[in-house]
Image (spheres, helix red, strand yellow):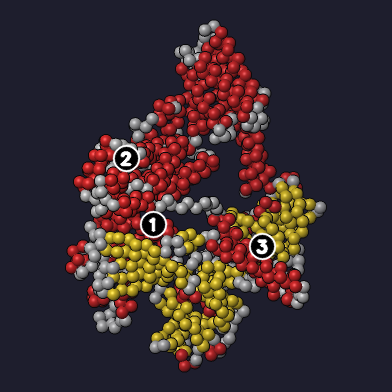
């Protein structure tokens, strides 16, 4: 989201300040130009750098601007009465941040954490402020730059798979990476609500 | 006349060229363009085409805004210039330029004006005598179409204005009360004057005309006081206080008005106040002779002595009044010295140099220092470090230890401010209350420099207001009653703050009639708060006044309401994790003792274990803890569990079951029971082990986790892990469901 806004902003600015054409053009043309740029920026929305990581043999990517840092596994204090995928909270240099196990979030089989297990600390848009959340992934791979033509829209899987939080599928070297809208992944879930204890 | 058209045409082309070739914000070129437009404007002064002139003017103002970086959008300028070119061609061809210029003038005006007008918009329609319309005639119509896109920079300026003005007005309040007591205190007058002056200046720049008008009037009044044309008296103090209140209300409405574009001054009319100020101006008095007045008040000279001395002074203006008095043996030199000393005593307030810092930055600093302390402790406890033999290294580590703890203390104290600011607000309150109630009240303050968490100071305001109101209204007797009781006619209210045992104690005392035990009992019984034949110890009777819906005042007064006050006080103090107690003795007065933690961020917590998990229970809620014996344990219908302790049956809750944890010890006699109190109700929490008391820093767990039931927040424990703080209210709700 914020990526598209940023690029849009830059294009607008350069349009009014630097790309002033030879003759003074009427308002209408300038506005037309702006519109074109806006629609362009929507298309180019998904293009950019992604941090890729693995989860149960599948490759995923998160937009690099969302990521604050990557840390190794550390002791997690579990919080009672939260959904299972909320592993608990950790002390990130004096700040208490919640940790979500992405495997459990996607209803995958959980595994023992290894020394390859990482916590990716992401910043997501909250209601008023951005909140910092850590997500547990099997291992972090690399940062890749995806061009527009490499990204495909998410095919529909019918009712048994919710694709709302998938931005698109990126193809690279014959492999498919699933680009996540991490805001959506973590947004839809209120960590505090949980079914009454059995 | 003939060369004029050529001149203008050339200039327009020049400007257009400049605009095209300009890169970003090139100030010299903008300057050239401004000069060009100015030339055009003066060249077409004799023109009958007023529209042309308006357009040039509008372009000029807009360009000025660009130069001042108030806007970066060049587009309206381009469009306007293009119109100007075509318009000029039309004039050259002697044809009429038919395109309607209003929209372009509007965009130029609206964009150039920015948000202040949007707010001023509302005022503009109601405030007919404002001079603004005449200032910029070409943009007057833009007021009707406020620009919804507030520029961030303008917002920032306005927000700064709001916070600075409100801060300044708070100083005014205090200084003014000082001033009333020491009318010659130059420092106070200047402080007040400065504040109104700043508000006047900035509001005119932001074009908040109403605020500007009022601030201007108040400033004029103060100027007279400053020049000693006027002596401060109660009437003037009232007017300045009223202006201040009105300004406060106007200013605090700005953000709302900015959002909605609504009028600033709905229901707030400045006209009557301005009129009152003007009346004061008319009856300007002669300044008094301060030294003479002081001596007169002290009784060291008589009125006649003073008048004759003044007479002499009139003939010989160089002579000082004190000297004349001594010469004529009306007063001793000692008395004059005393008077002069009193005159000069008005102390200049010590001004501390301050830096405003974002609280986020402060919190981060506190976080980081906390981490530093933990990391340092880990380093110290590391076996490798403990086996060190190098003396120098050990010494250095010791030094590091000291610096770290010093840093931690300092970072904690950053949030602390003297309680003075909360106390000083009470001066005004007592002054107003004295007026309303007709009682004479003196406010005595002690320990204003005691430091307390910034947030606590703000939160403390309301409970203090309630309590002081109660003191004046219910505590203190009227003058006659006081004299009858053999007391001084002036009642005393004491405000006292001090540290004790990691707490801040704030005492609010009065020397009134004290609480009437029988009256309270009677009232409580009639309100159904207690049983007819309940036998309560004295302190519990007094605590009844904190019950909701309790009031002993026989008549409801304007000042303190219907007895909703004291339970609000108690709630307010409890949210600050504090306690309030009453000491009272009939006929001698009563004292409210508020006990508060030093800071909101730190609590004393009991670290407990259940199963494999550790939790923190706020120490304030713990009544007692004990090892259970099977004899104390009862069940109801096999489910509801009760503990019989000290003659009371207390419902029991198992923490491990409540939180769905792995069960800890199963045998009840291996468990620890902790009796907790919340909101007057008790409960026994069953857990496995008490690990010890610790001072902990409360941390929020972020937006996502803030609604977790039963958990109030997190804290970093000594080993760097997070411990969860149990939320008393949450636990209660959980058990009730």
- Residue A91's image quarter? bottom right
**Horizontal relation, residue B189 to residue A91: left or right:** left
Residue drawn at 25 percent across, 48 percent down: B329
Image quadrant in which the C terminus of chain A is located: bottom right
What element does badge 1 sit on? helix
How far apart in space, not on screen, are marks 3 and 2 (Cα)?
Answer: 84 Å
Residue B635 rendering spot, x and y as whole percentages: 45, 88
How far apart in space, not on screen, are marks 3 and 1 (Cα)?
Answer: 50 Å
The residue sitting at the right extreme is: A173
The residue sitting at the top extreme is: B2
Residue occupied by mark 3: A135
Residue occupied by mark 2: B319
Residue drawn at 25 percent across, 56 percent down: B436
**If you read the primary sequence from the N terminus, does the residue marked by circle 2 or circle 1 appear first?**
2
Whether residue B730 is visible, yes or no, is: no
Residue B274 rendering spot, x and y as whole percentages: 31, 39
Residue B36 rendering spot, x and y as whole percentages: 57, 20
Q: Nearer the viewer, residue B209 or B397?
A: B397
**Circles 3 and 1 on the same subunit:** no
**Circles 2 and 1 on the same subunit:** yes
- Residue A58's image quarter? bottom right
**Depicted B504 relative to depicted A1: above or below:** below
Q: Nearer the viewer, residue B233 or A28?
A: B233
Residue occupied by mark 1: B424
How far apart in space, not on screen, are marks 2 and 1 (Cα)?
Answer: 40 Å
**Horizontal relation, residue A163 to residue B543: left or right:** right
Output the chain of dot 3. Answer: A
Kindly indicate whether the residue at mark 1 contacts the one at mark 3 (C-beta within 8 angstroms): no
- Residue B529's image quarter? bottom left
**Depicted A149 relative to depicted B473: above or below:** above
The residue sitting at the bottom extreme is: B631
């Amino acid at each position: 989201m914020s990526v598209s806004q940023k690029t849009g902003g830059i294009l607008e600015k350069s349009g009014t300040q630097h790309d002033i054409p030879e003759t003074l053009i009427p308002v209408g043309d300038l506005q037309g130009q702006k519109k074109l740029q806006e629609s362009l920026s929507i298309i180019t929305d998904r293009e950019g750098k992604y941090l890729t990581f693995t989860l149960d043999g599948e490759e995923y990517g998160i937009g690099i601007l969302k990521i604050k840092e990557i840390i190794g596994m550390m002791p997690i204090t579990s919080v009672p009465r939260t959904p299972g995928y909320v592993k608990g909270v950790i002390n990130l240099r004096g700040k208490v941040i919640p940790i979500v196990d992405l495997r459990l979030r996607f209803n995958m089989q959980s595994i023992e954490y290894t020394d390859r297990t990482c916590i990716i600390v992401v910043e997501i848009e909250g209601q008023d402020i951005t909140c910092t959340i850590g997500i547990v992934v099997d291992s972090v791979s690399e940062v890749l730059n995806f061009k527009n033509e490499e990204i495909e829209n998410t095919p529909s899987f019918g009712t048994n798979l919710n694709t709302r939080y998938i931005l698109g599928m990126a193809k690279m070297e014959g492999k498919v990476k699933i680009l996540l809208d991490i805001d959506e992944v973590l947004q839809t879930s209120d960590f505090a609500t949980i079914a009454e204890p059995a | 006349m003939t060369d004029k058209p050529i001149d203008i045409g050339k200039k327009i082309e020049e400007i257009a060229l400049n605009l095209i070739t300009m890169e970003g914000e090139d100030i010299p070129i903008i300057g050239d363009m401004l000069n060009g437009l100015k030339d055009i404007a003066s060249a077409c002064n004799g023109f009958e085409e007023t529209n042309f002139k308006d357009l040039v003017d509008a372009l000029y103002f807009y360009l000025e805004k660009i130069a001042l970086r108030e806007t970066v959008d060049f587009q309206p300028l381009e469009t306007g210039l293009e119109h100007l070119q075509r318009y000029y061609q039309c004039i050259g061809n002697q044809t009429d330029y038919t395109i309607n210029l209003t929209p372009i003038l509007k965009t130029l005006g609206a964009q150039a004006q920015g948000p202040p007008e949007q707010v001023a918009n509302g005022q503009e329609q109601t405030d007919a005598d404002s001079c603004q319309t005449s200032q910029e005639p070409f943009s007057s119509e833009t007021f009707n179409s406020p620009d919804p896109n507030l520029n961030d920079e303008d917002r920032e300026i306005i927000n700064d204005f709001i916070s600075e003005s409100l801060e300044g007005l708070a100083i005014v309040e205090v200084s003014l009360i000082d001033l009333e007591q020491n009318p010659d205190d130059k420092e106070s007058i200047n402080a007040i004057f400065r504040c109104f002056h700043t508000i006047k200046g900035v509001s005119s720049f932001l074009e908040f005309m109403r605020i500007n008008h009022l601030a201007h009037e108040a400033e004029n009044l103060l100027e007279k006081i400053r020049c000693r044309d006027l002596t401060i008296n109660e009437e003037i103090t009232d007017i300045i206080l009223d202006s201040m209140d009105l300004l406060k209300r106007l200013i605090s409405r700005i953000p709302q008005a900015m959002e909605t574009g609504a009028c600033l001054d709905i229901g707030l009319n400045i006209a009557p106040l301005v009129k009152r100020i003007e009346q004061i101006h008319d009856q300007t008095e002669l300044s008094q002779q301060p030294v003479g007045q002081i001596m007169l008040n002290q009784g060291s000279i008589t009125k006649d002595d003073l008048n004759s001395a003044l007479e002499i002074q009139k003939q010989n203006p160089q002579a000082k009044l004190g000297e004349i008095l001594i010469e004529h043996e009306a007063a001793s030199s000692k008395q004059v010295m005393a008077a002069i000393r009193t005159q000069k005593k008005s102390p200049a307030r010590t001004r501390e140099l301050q830096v405003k810092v974002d609280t986020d930055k402060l919190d981060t600093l506190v976080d980081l220092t906390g981490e530093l302390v933990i990391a340092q402790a880990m380093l110290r406890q590391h076996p490798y470090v403990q086996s060190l033999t190098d003396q120098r290294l050990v010494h250095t580590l010791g030094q590091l230890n000291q610096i770290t703890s010093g840093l931690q203390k300092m970072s904690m104290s950053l949030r602390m401010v003297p309680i003075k600011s909360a106390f000083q607000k009470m001066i005004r309150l007592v002054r107003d209350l004295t007026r309303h109630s007709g009682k004479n009240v003196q406010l005595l303050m002690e320990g204003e420099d005691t430091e307390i968490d910034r947030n606590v100071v703000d939160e403390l305001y309301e409970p203090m207001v309630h309590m002081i109101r109660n003191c004046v209204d219910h505590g203190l007797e009227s003058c006659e009653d006081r004299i009858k009781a053999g007391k001084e006619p002036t009642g005393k209210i004491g405000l006292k703050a001090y540290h004790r045992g990691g707490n801040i104690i704030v005492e609010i005392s009065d020397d009134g009639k004290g609480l009437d035990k029988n009256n309270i009992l009677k009232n409580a019984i009639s309100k159904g708060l207690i049983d007819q034949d309940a036998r309560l110890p004295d302190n519990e009777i007094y605590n009844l006044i904190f019950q909701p819906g309790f009031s002993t005042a026989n008549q409801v007064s304007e000042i303190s309401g219907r007895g909703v006050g004291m339970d609000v006080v108690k709630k307010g103090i409890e949210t600050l994790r504090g306690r309030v107690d009453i000491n009272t003795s009939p006929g001698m007065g009563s004292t409210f003792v508020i006990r508060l933690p030093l800071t909101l961020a730190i609590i004393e917590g009991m670290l407990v274990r259940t199963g494999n998990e550790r939790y923190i229970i706020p120490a304030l809620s713990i009544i007692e803890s004990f090892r259970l014996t099977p004899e104390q344990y009862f069940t109801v219908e096999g489910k509801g569990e009760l503990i019989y302790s000290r003659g009371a049956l207390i419902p029991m809750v198992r923490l491990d079951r409540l939180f769905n944890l792995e069960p800890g010890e199963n045998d009840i006699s291996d468990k620890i029971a902790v009796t907790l109190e919340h909101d007057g109700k008790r409960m026994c929490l069953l857990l496995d082990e008490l690990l010890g008391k610790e001072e902990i820093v409360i941390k929020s767990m972020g937006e996502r986790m803030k609604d977790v039931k039963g958990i109030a927040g997190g804290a970093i424990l000594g080993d760097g892990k997070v411990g969860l703080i149990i939320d008393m209210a949450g636990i209660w709700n959980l058990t009730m469901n």
